Amino acid sequence: MVFKKIETQELPDIHSHGHLYEHEETGAQVLHLANNDTNKSFTIGFKTPPYNDNGITHILEHSVLNGSKKYPSKEPFVELIKGSLNTFVNAMTFSDKTIYPVASTNEKDFGHLVDVYLDAVFQPKLYHDKQILAQEGWHYHLENEEDELIYKGVVYNEMKGAAASPEGQIYDHISSQLYPNTVYSKNSGGDPKEIPTLTHEEFIAYHQMHYHPSNSLTIVYGDLNRTDLFSKLEEYFDGMGKQDEAIDLSIKPSQPKEAVHTDTYSITAGDNPAGKDYLALAWHGALPDETLDIIGLEVLDEILFGNNQSPLKKALLDAEIGGDINSDVSEIGYPTAFMIMAKYSEADKMATFKDVVQETLTDLVDKGIDKERIQAALNKITFQTREAAISEDNPRGVIYAIQSLNTWLYDKDPFINLQFNHYLNELSKKADEGYFEELIQRKLIDNDLFTQIILKAEPGKSDKQEAKTLKKLQEYKEKISDDERQRIIKETRALIERQETPDRSEDLAKIPTLKREDLTTDEQEYPLEEEAFNEETTFYYAEQFTSGIDYIDLYFDISDFNQSEYECLGYFSHLLGKLATDNYDESALQTEMDTHTGGIYGGVSIYEEREGKIKPFFKISGKALAASLDDLVGLMKEIAMHTHFDNKSELLKITQRLISNFENKVNFSSHGIVANRALSQVKPTAKLSEHLGGIDQFNYLKSVRDDLKADDRAISKDLTHLLDKLMNKARLNVLYTGDAERKETVKNALKAAFNSLPSKPLGDKAVYETGEKQSEAYITAQDVNYVGLGSDASGHFDFSGATQVLSTAFRFDYLWNAIRVKGGAYGSLYRHTRNGSVALGSYRDPNIKNTLDVYEGIPDYVKALELSEEELLKYIIGTLSPLEQPKSAHSKGLTAFNRLQHKITKDDIVELKKEILNTDAGKLQALHKGFKAVIDDGSVVVIGNKTQIENQKDLFDKIYELY
């Protein structure tokens, strides 16, 4: 065996045994986290420090997945997803590392994923195929002599979108200012201004140096065959030799580059910049071997900023430093930083910002931090870490891989971050000895490794930069020779031809996939019992092993609430647990919740049965260890029945935070926003969702903010009215997820707690309408676009196995190639749900009209779709994959409840799987007429760049400014 074991550790916190191995020839290390989890994972990572801002590490992450020696098709990564039952497949670029994680519960599938990924990272085609860098990174794009010369590339456009985020810019500035002249002063994702400087020669040289076994760290997790795994690794490690010099990522923190760094970010041209600046303070926090202090800083962050009543956050909000205050313990890489950010501020408040922070921290050190607040923070983080260790909603092996790399990458113990209970217990003991006060003094007050960032709002900055780039490109086009121009045109057309040319069948056949006999229509049973709770309401019980945690979800029937009340309901849902009640002020309530529970929060759930009946519920959810049931139920009662809405100052703070959250969502999730907005014009359920959390809710929040600033108290009356209307025995249903022997205890506790509720008959069921049907565009300060289309397939085709297989074909073939590969967007979405909703969206897209043309081409694609048995099988497997994802105990309980409300049974899921397995090409092609009607009837919504929207204004009925 060429791997030798060098260390073993018991890891009870993650229910695993840790085994560390080293490949004798190359020195490559492999960590096996062994346990009985069937959701196996494999993660291989490389130290990849950037040397400038050209995005080389990020572009390589994309490019190695574009074909390899064994698997030479253009994108084996995509082909693999089509035919895999994976539970996770991705690749990620960090500031100093790049990782390639996969996970699957299917042993055979897991082996396929590992095979393809290993060949991709060690034997990529990019050495000899320059078109890979051109497609994934950047290229000059000129299809015809008369066209404008532009830059195009997937990462180029992705980073144009990322650069629009002021929060992202703050993090970049903090890293570059705190750690000048180090790898952490570079933008590993890539600066769009610098990406076009990357050459193919640099590209190849970087891969040769950094993607070597000696520079790799591999983490495998779960119940897997270690011998088989090592054999796969040996195929790529053996004979590679050992690199002469290891890559050292350690740094010695020095004085920041500038005491105060000032820059600007873009807001929409013509927008008023007043009150839209960002301010940040940041300190160097710790190095990888300071584990106790790193976890201590995370607890301190919760103590100081965990909620609006936390001492430092409250002081900054009360001093009106910003409309929203954020903080973070940022694991930048080798160093960890502590930062505070004020949003909706003014540059001239920086001195006051700094003074308030220093005065508040000094006061906390001098007087001592409230012990209950410390204990609450420790309890909250302990609950979160222990719950995560038993949750199956996310691939635990991938999460643990990233955690282990946070020390292992820097030649430290890989097990440290997997032993969190030891450090949390130590912090709990040290808290009584003044540890957190000492930590504030040492890491914040007396720390001169400190910087200040001012980011001013600049109207139209992105448009001016884009115009400057375009002008520079046209000047370059005019300056170069005719031969050079023709060379660019030839290369552009050759790239398009490559993108449009199907892979050779023999290349596709090399990609491993499952067989039909590996597939099953089996479906797990999610038990759900029903008992009477109050008169005409129900107590639902989902028996699951929850490791001693009680999960309680209160469902208040709101079927008689008018549609006009939903915007206020959406706002109301975010207020519960954050405002004073009869027996607690805001601060005491937060401390009680953090001390005794895993959280209590509100929301709205909307269900639609097959026949179209809409069933909405207002939901209050809570969770706690069994020993804290009385505290959990008491607090849920207190919040549900006795919340006060008369504190204008607190309402304004929360409102500002919600507005901030939505604006951040625009920067990172606008494809979802436009898709639902478009759907809201054709589906009533989507319109309700729009009221609750979409652009309607955003506009409502802005009006509430203005009213609160004007001292208008109407909102307090509206909220109180909603609470009074909600608190009715006739509305209250309960879902309990937990252990069988606790069912009666939980039920009785809830009945006693809510027994005093009045019981009143519900009103007539409300009728819900769609939004006005119109093509809409929303202008933001972005250089990219998000293009959405929503339609109703009801009456054109039914939800079926065939339509779901076609959905997979859209996502991983038609839309992937047309919007991402050829169009240069970062990605796209397509979904078709049981209620007939069809939604499309593009993500960080340089196009608008071209993308709409792609959507219009869907019927022709369907009509012409011809699939071999092998191709069809891949789509079938990829369609089954989401139906096989592991779930946590609570998610299983929620799934059982949700299926009941939708009137979906286990047999329905089995039948869907059968339909998927029985799909043939003829069934898919027969859908083309229905898709033509669906696309033709669709509504269009776009969020994006001002210039592009205005240049294509004829596409829209209405154009708005989003902010």
Image: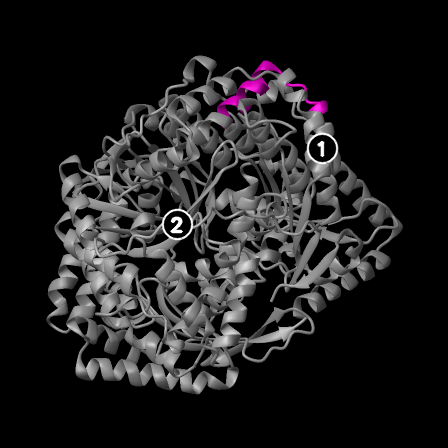
Asked if residue 418 is positioned above or below residue 71 in the image, the reply reads below
The label number, if any, that marks residue 432 in the structure image: none
Quarter of the image containing the N terminus?
top left
Asked if residue 523 is positioned above or below residue 404 in the image, the reply reads above
Q: Would you identify the image quadrant in which residue 397 lies?
A: top left
Q: Residues within 10 Å of mark 2 (few under 14, many from 20)?
A: some
The label number, if any, that marks residue 933 in the structure image: 1
23 is within the stretch colored magenta = no
> Residue 213, position in %: x, y?
40, 38
Element under label 1?
helix
Q: Amino acid at mark 2?
A: Leu
> Residue 75, position in %: x, y?
58, 32
Quarter of the image containing the C terminus?
bottom right
In contact (CB < 8 Å): disc 2 and disc 1:
no
873 is within the stretch colored magenta = yes
Q: Earlier in the sequence, mark 2 or mark 1?
A: 2
Q: Is residue 928 left or right of residue 307?
A: right
Read off the residue under disc 2: 762
Instruction: State the residue in front, 794 or 162.
Output: 794
